[in-house]
Every structure is written in C-alpha cells, then in structure tokens.
Image (spheres, rainbow, N blue to C red):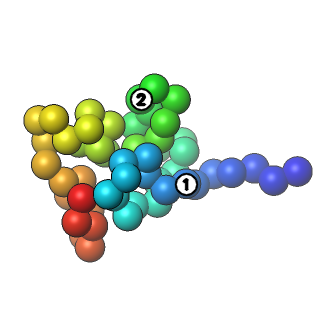
Amino acid sequence: MTTITQMKCACQTCLCVVSIEEAVKNDDKYYCSEACAEGHKTLKGCAHNGCGC
C-alpha cells in the first residue's frame, strides 16, 4: 500500500508541491497557502520563490 504525503497545490496556476499535513485545506483540496486556498480573491501569489501564480 502506498501512502501519499505530498501533492501539487490545487490552485491551477500554482507550481508548488505541498505536504498534505501542512497544507491549507479548502473544499477537500490541498493548497500551499491561504492565497491559493481563497482563489486569489484578496491575496495575490503564494509568496513561494519561483512560483508565478
């Protein structure tokens, strides 16, 4: 059996891979930051180096 511990941020334009344990969870999806989790309605980008979301 394989246990998944990391996955790509659920934000379509984000390039980040996030630890499921540390992710921001919203609607059963995992995000790397509050900005991605809220759909960038009030926050821009995710503030991670090299990511242009």
> Residue 26: which numbered mark, if any?
2
Horizontal side of residue 52 vs 7, given as left or right? left
| Residue of label 1 | 7
Q: Is residue 37 above or below residue 1?
A: above
| In this rendering, position of residue 1 left or right of residue 32 | right
- Taking the spot 37% from the left edge, 52% from the top edge, the residue there is 12
Which of pointers 1 and 2 lies earlier in the amino acid sequence?
1
One can see residue 16 in this view: yes
Which residue, as the protein is rendered here, is positioned at the far top? 27
The amino acid on which the numbered mark 1 sits, given as a three-letter code, is: Met
Rendering coords of residue 33 (x, y %): 31, 45
- Packing grade of label 2 (10 A; few <14, some 14-19, many >=20) is few
Amino acid type, callout 2: Asn
- Residue 31 is left or right of residue 45, and the answer is right
Quadrant assignment, res 26: top left
The front one of 19 and 28 is 28
The image shows residue 35 at horizontal and vertical percentages of: 23, 42
Q: Residues within 10 Å of mark 1 (few under 14, many from 20)?
A: some
Q: Secondary structure at mark 1?
A: strand
Q: Position of residue 53 (x, y in %)?
A: 24, 59
Spatial CA distance of label 1 from label 2 is 14 Å
Residue placed farthest to the front in the image? 12
Residue 23 visible, this orientation? no
What residue is drawn where x is 26% and y is 73%?
Answer: 50
Q: Quadrant of residue 41?
A: top left
Q: Which element carries disc 2, helix, strand or loop? A: strand
Task: Please name the residue shown 57% across and 54% down the image.
Answer: 6
